Each structure stands twice: as structure tokens, then as C-alpha cells.
Image (tube, helix red, strand yellow):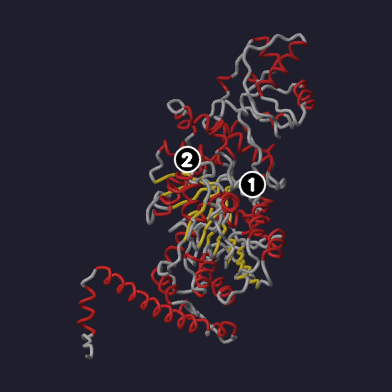
Amino acid sequence: MRKKFRDSDDDEEIILKEPKNKALIERKRQRKQQNRNKSSIENLIEQVTSKYDTLNSPTFIANKFSDFPLSPVTLKGLKDSNFTTPTDIQLLSLKHSIIGKDVVGAAKTGSGKTLALLIPLLECLWRNKWTKFDGLGAIVITPTRELAFQIFQVLNNIGSYHDFSAALLIGGTDVEFERERLAGISIVICTPGRLLQHMDENGYFCFDQLQMLVIDEADRILDMGFKQQIDAIIENLPKQRQTLLFSATQTKRVEDLVRVSLNDPVFVSAHEGAKNSTPDQLTQSYLVCEEEDKINIVWSFLRNHKTKKTLIFVTSCKQARFLTEAITHLRPGLFFTGLWGGLKQGKRMERFQRFDEIVNKGAAMICTDIASRGLDFVGLDWVLQMDCPPSVDDYIHRVGRTARMNKSGEAMLMLTSNQEDAFVEMLKARQIPINKVEVEKQKLFSIQLKLANLMIPFPEVKHFAQSAFVAYARAVYFAQLKAVFNVDSINFEALAKSYGLPLTPRIRFLRKRGVNVGDSDNKKKTVADEVKLGGDTSSNAFDVDEEQEKDEKDVGDEFLKIARRDVFNEVAEVKPEEEILARISSKKAITKTHLASKMLRRLGNSGIAKRKRFAESDEDND
């Protein structure tokens, strides 16, 4: 008897009545759809890659991103992010980086290097059909946390239609939390130290299949002392990879890094034949003033530019902390904040984002050179440099925070009369157009008395001022450009008063080098004087909290290498201390208390009675 078969529709209806059968059919449909999608993606990849040959054609012209052979998902992300027209550095580099060549790029600040490194990264992984099961596909290394965060944001915007996952690895965050999230990550945006930490400690961090390495602001990374970390990172990465390196300046150390990490690279420079080293739409000027007038000028500038968005650069973290606290208390009439390396990571990101989000209204931020590289603040009108930068390169990067992407901007530099001739000559030698403006002192707002009165209800502001005073003196003394920076030219007494301080803080390391810091004569005491009189100068000195001091190392202040716990509550020079230090064995750990006791016992043997109190201080690293 012939078996009668049911109609296929009836058969499917019967099967679907069983939940298990329904799930099986659904998975089967999904697999079919995935196979169709896979076939479609392969055809699409073949279509895009077949156009790569046109990039090397002399007739190739790209007036917009859609003229490049890019994946539809990348083009859609660029369009949604309002990126339509490529800049010079993007035009020059993308022709080579898209097809897999190693590239070394150099361009002015604000020229669009971020897209020049992210677009080929996305295309590389898309072309290789990268999935979360393939492991880590690309690494982007930046010098600072803020720049890493900004690149991460741009990546999320233009790569929103890709299926890749990305992670941000920066210092100041929970390592254990990052460790758990790294499994299945395709792209990592990071700083050198945190990346190396995960390489050494995280067994789940696998980079054997890495396709691309990107090093952004390479000159800055090396200047900040990350050469050993970068060398260690590169040594652990697979040799068969594509590498992109972007640097504003081509120094010898950058050239050495290129030789080690890149394979037959293509060198591109967007503004090699440019007339000026800074953007043409940037208006630059400088003024000459005394050190003690700088704070008044900054305050007057803020009062007269309440509707402008301004970035104010200072030399050290301690200056940034003091000015942020003091000016915030004085209420300048606009949003005011500060950004420096010693801040906890949460505060750094919060302040950075809040300042960046302010558009079309007044805002100002005090910062160190931590904010001088790569960061793109929306609608920034002014860059005001309260202190002379340590080099011309640093000047270029500072003013490069404004007038970005063909927008206009203004920059003002404050110099002393001793700095003017040498530094202006150096700027002009680098084709930097700058004009001198005059300051009418009678129109300045003086806040010296306000600062002095502020220290009564807020004693921590006084401590911040003393710390900032010494940090600035130290920075000037150790600056490399001796033709520009001369610590002897500073009127320390007037400078201290401009900070609101009643007395000039003691700076022992300068006095030891024969520099007159203008200390009040009635406050100068030797150890012998204090012992005889039983004196205690603690009222004019302060102890910097040890944890606070640890947080004050700024990655942007390369020339500030010496950190001391208490530079004000120090005793005068004593020969026995030097003799004791010379006899200390390097293998034996000596505490500060033990060292102080030895010195006092030696003084006691010389006929001087022991003092009742001894203020602890760090070893002299000057």
C-alpha cells in the first residue's frame, strides 16, 4: 500500500505545534540568513577591495569620503557624524593606510589626524571579517587619558554600524573591572602604562592575532618618558601587522621608533610646504608684563570675556590647583574649572567632559600641558598662556587647541621683559606669526587683597598658594631654555604678594644655589638659632599631605622632576647632615626620623642643646 505524504504546509503546521521543533526550525532559518549575509558581505568586500588600485592612480581625486573605496557601514557612520569632506592629512594618508601599508604621518594640530587613524583601522577589521571570537584586532596608543577618551568617543560614533567591540584602558580606573571585560574585545584605546600592565598581568589579554597598531602623538609619548614601555609593548606584538604612527614633529627619537616598529613605511606630511607652522585662521599675540601682574591679567581677561570659551595654560599642577580653587571662590561670572595630572580619574573625566560640552556661552579652564596634545574642545575661542611654554613645540601644541578644522580662534601669550626677545625670535624662526599688544595697567582688576582675605576662611588656599609659588620657582630654575628662563629676574617678594601671601615662602634649594628669593629677614633662622631660642617656625610653614603630594606628578610637566614633601618647613644648611648622608649605605634603609636623630645628636656633641621640635622633610633631591 502506497504511503500518502502530507502537504509541506500541513507538515510544517504539525511540526510547529511542538515547541522544541519550533526552536529547531528558527535556528535553521537563522543559519540560512547568516549564510546569505556572509555571502553578501564577501561579495561586498570583493567589490570594495577591487577599487583599491584606483587609489594609486595619478587621476584619483577625493573631494568627499564617499570617493574613497570604503565599506558602506563606515561611510554611514561618517555621514551620521557629519564628516563628509576629508582634510589634507586624511587625503594623503588614507590612500596608503586603507590598502594595508605602514604610514608615518605629520600634520599641524587640528588637522584631523584622529579620523586618519580610525578609518583604516575599521576598514582593516571589516575587510578581515573580524568577530569577537578572533580576539584583539587593533590597538591605539595615546599619551594621555583625555586624548584616549576622545578617540574612544569618535570611534563609537563613526563605527556605530560595525559589529566590533571596543574598550578604553587608562590609568585611574578599576583594573579588575577592565580585566573581565577584555575577553571578546576587538579594539583597545589605551595609554602605554595601562596597556603594558594588562600585557604583563592579564592572562585573558590575547593579542596573537593583532592586525593593526596605531601610535598617536608619538613624539609626546616619547617626551613623557614612555620609551621603555613602548619598546616592551612592540616587542610582545606579532611582527606581521600594519602600523600607523602619527607625530606632530619628527624628532630623532621618533625616527628611531619608526625604524624599530614599522615595515617600509610611507611618509606623509600635510603641511610640509606651509608658510606658517600654525593654522592660518589662528590670530596670535603676546603681551609683556611682570610676573606679579599675571594673576591680575588673567582675572581681568575673564571679566572681559565672560561669553567666550577659554583655555588657560600654566606651568605646574600646583599652580593649576591654586588658581582653580582661588578663582572659583572669587566667582568670575562664568563656568570655571581646572584640569591637571594630580586629579583623580573620575574628576578628570568629569571636568573634561563638562567643559567640552559647553557651547556658545562663557567658560574657562585652567590646565597644564596635559591638555596640550590632541584634545579637541568644541567651540574653543581663546587659548591664554599665563606662563611661557618650555619650548616652541609646546607653544604650537597649546595654541593648537583652538582654530581647529578650518575654524577661527585666538591665542594670547604672556611674557616677561626678560623672556620677550629670545622667545619671540624663536617663534619667528619657526614661521609663527605673532603680534605684540599692550596692557593698560590702570584698567586691570587687582585681586591681591581678595586673595589675601580669601585665605582667612579657606586656609587650604594659602597652602595651595605656597605650594604653587615654590613649584613655579622650581620650574623656572630647571627649565632647559636658559636664554628664556632666568630665575634671578623674578621679584619673589612681589610675586608672593600677588598670590595673596603675607610673607615670601622659603625656597631652600634656590638659596643653596645662591639665588636671592627675598625671604623676610626676621624669618631666617639657622638650626642653632632655633635650638637656642626653642623656636618653632611651623606657623609660617606647612606640611604637604603625603598622599596629596603623590597625586601632583603631572604627565604634562616633563621638566618638573623633583617632588618634595615640605619645602617651607626646612632648616638651614647643616654640614653634619651632608656628612651623614655621605656615609649612608645604599643597601641600608634609613628613615627620616632616624636621620634627624643622628643629625641632632651630632649637633648636641658640638655644644648645642637639642631642639624641642623637628619638622620632618624629604631627602634633598635637588
Residue at far front of view: 1
Asked whether, in this view, residue 408 is left or right of residue 292, the answer is: left
Image position of 472 with respect to 431: above or below: above
Location of the C terminus by quadrant is: top right
Task: Give the image location of residue 614, x and y in percent.
Answer: 63, 18
Task: Give the image location of residue 480, x and y in percent.
Answer: 70, 47
Asked whether, in this view, residue 609 is left or right of residue 446, the answer is: right
Task: Give the image location of residue 604, x and y in percent.
Answer: 74, 11
Image position of 312 with respect to 598: above or below: below
Instruction: Compute the Cα span from label 1 to label 2.
Output: 21 Å
The count of marks equals 2
In front of the other: label 1 or label 2?
1
Q: Which residue is mark 1?
A: 558
Q: Which mark is residue 192?
A: none
Q: Residues within 10 Å of mark 1 (few under 14, many from 20)?
A: some
**Amino acid type at mark 2:** Thr
Q: Classify mark 2: helix, strand or loop.
A: helix
Q: Which mark is residue 324?
A: 2
Label whose residue precedes the other's in the sequence (1 or 2): 2
Asked whether, in this view, residue 136 is left or right of residue 337, the answer is: right
Task: Give the image location of residue 422, x and y in percent.
Answer: 69, 51
**Amino acid type at mark 1:** Glu
Q: Classify mark 1: helix, strand or loop.
A: loop
